[in-house]
Amino acid sequence: MGDVGGTQVVVAGAGPAGLATALLLARGGVPCQVLEAAGSPGEAAGPHSGGPRAGQPYVYSGFFRRRLMERLPDVYADLLDQGAQTFDTDGAPEEPSPYGDLAGREGKAVQGDRLSLTCSGTVVTAALARALAAEPLARVRHGDRVRGLRTEGDRITGVRLTGETVEASTVVDALGRSSPLAPDFTVTVDEVDCGVTHSTRLYRTDPADGPSAIAGRMIKFQGEAFSARVLPQGPDTFAVTFRYLAGDQVLERLTTPEGFSRALRFLPGIGDRLATAVPAGAIISGIDPPLLLRCLDDQAPVGYLPVGDALCAVDVESGSGAALALEGATCVARALTAPVDGAPDASFGAFANGLLRHTYERSARRSIVRTRLWEAAVTAMEPVARSGPNARLPTRAAMASALLL
Ligand SMILES: Cc1cc2nc3c(=O)[nH]c(=O)nc-3n(C[C@H](O)[C@H](O)[C@H](O)COP(=O)(O)OP(=O)(O)OC[C@H]3O[C@@H](n4cnc5c(N)ncnc54)[C@H](O)[C@@H]3O)c2cc1C
C-alpha cells in the first residue's frame, strides 16, 4: 500500500485535511496509507485534543461548499443526506483579496458562493471517511500514533509509530495544530491567542409550530464584549453560540443552563422563538484555540508536506478552517498525482504564500481587534469609568444584571 512509482505516500492524521488528501490521492491513482491515532473513525475527527464534540455547530464558507461540490460531489451529496443545511450569508462586502476570497467574492461574486453550509463538525469528517472507505487505493489504520519521521540525509524513509516504523518517502502531515512533526520541520510565523471562550446549545422546535423563523439563514449579534450567532442545524433544530472573553466573570454564567436561557432574551427576535423551543443536550463550552501560522523550515526533508491546521489555523468562527484544509489537500494531491520532475511543491507554495497567508492575516487582524474591543467594554464597566462624565449604560450592564441576579 502507499507505493507508486517508488513513492510511498503516508497521510498522517484522519481529520478533514488528511481524509480529503487521501481521497483525492486515491482517486488520482496514487495509493496511500492513512495513520490515525484515534481507535475508530467515530473517535477521530479532532480539530483539537478530543475532537469536535457532537453538538458543535460548524459553518463552512461558500468557497468550501463550492470546492467540495466541484472536487468531491459525492461527499457533498452525502452531507446533505446527513442533514447539513445551506444558508445564505448576509452578503456584507469584504475587503478584496488579490488571491481570491474564501467567501468566494474574488472581486466579482461567484454564483452560489454566498450559500454556506452548516452542520455538526463531525458530519463532514464522517462523510469523508465513508467515501474513503470505498477507495481500494487507500487504507486507513486506526490506533496508530505518529511519533516522528525516520530520515536519511534530506529524504524521508519512514514514519515512526510506537514500536514500529512504516516505510514512507512522502508524508502529508495532517496531524492538526499539535502535530508532533511540525516543531521539527516548520517555523512558527505567528501565533495569536485571543482568549475567547464559546458556549453553545442546541434547541429543537416543534414542526407543528410551522417553519422555523431562522431556517435557511444565520443570525449574528454583536454585543458589548460578546457575540452570538444562531445557526440552523436541521429542519427543526438550531444552535445558539455565544463567544466572550475567557475569564469574564459576568459572561461565564453562560456555561450554566440558567445563565444561557437568560442571555437568550437579549437576542432580538430569538427570545420569542425560544418560547416554543426546547434545549436538546447540554451546553458545550470551550476555549477557542490560538490562531497559528507555520511555514516549512529550510531544513525540512524532501517529501514532508504539512496541510490543514498543522500549517495554519484561523479563527474558528471564520468558517475558513475546513476550506483551507480542503484547498491544501487539493494542492498536495494535485502535485503528487502529477509531479513535475519529482518536485511536488509548486502549486502548494503558491497557495501557502497567497490565499493561505492572506486568509490568516485577515483572520488574525479581525480577532485581535475583536478582543481589544471586548476588553475595552469590560474595562468600561469598572465603577470609575461608569461614574465619569460620559457615563452610559452599555448593553453589557443589562447582560450583567440579567445574568448575576
Ligand atoms: C471549537 C472549534 C470550532 C470550529 N469551528 C469551525 C467552523 O465552524 N468552520 C471551520 O471551517 N472550521 C472550524 N474549526 C476549525 C476546523 O476544525 C479545523 O480547521 C479543521 O479540523 C482542521 O483539520 P485538520 O485535518 O487539519 O486537523 P484536525 O481536525 O485537528 O485533525 C487531525 C487528526 O490527526 C489526528 N492526530 C493528531 N495527532 C496524531 C498523532 N500523533 N498520530 C496520529 N494521528 C494524530 C487527530 O486524532 C485528528 O483526527 C473549528 C475548530 C474548533 C476547535
Image (spheres, rainbow, N blue to C red):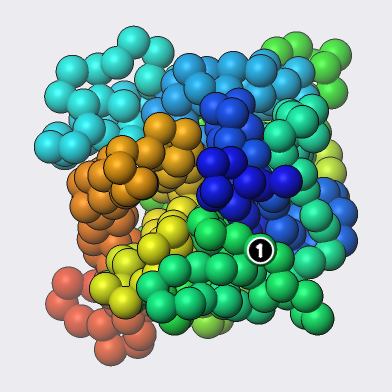
Q: Amino acid at mark 1?
A: Glu
Where is residue 152? Give x, y as percent. Answer: 48, 77
Q: Is residue 369 visible?
A: yes
- Seen in the image, is 108 located left or right of residue 136? left
Q: Residue at x 31, y 27 (%)?
A: 104
Classify residue 257 by image quadrant: bottom right
Residue 119 shown left or right of residue 108 in the figure: right
Whether the residue under disc 1 has CB within 8 Å of ligand 1: no
Q: Quadrant of the C terminus?
A: bottom right
Give SS at disc 1. Answer: strand
Measured as percent of width and height from the top left, residue 400 is found at: 52, 70
Q: Quadrant of residue 147?
A: bottom right
Please report the residue visible at 26 percent of the width from the left and 82 percent of the height from the top.
385
The residue closer to the viewer here, 345 or 331, is 345
Quadrant position of residue 174: bottom right
Quick one: label 1, few (<14), some, or many (20+) residues within 10 Å? many
**Closer to us: 202 or 223:** 202
Q: Is residue 368 above or below residue 232?
A: below
The reply to whether residue 256 is visible in this rendering is no
The residue sitting at 69% across, 52% down in the picture is 34
Look at the picture and state if 166 lies above or below 366: below
Numbered marks: total = 1
Q: Which residue is mark 1?
A: 167
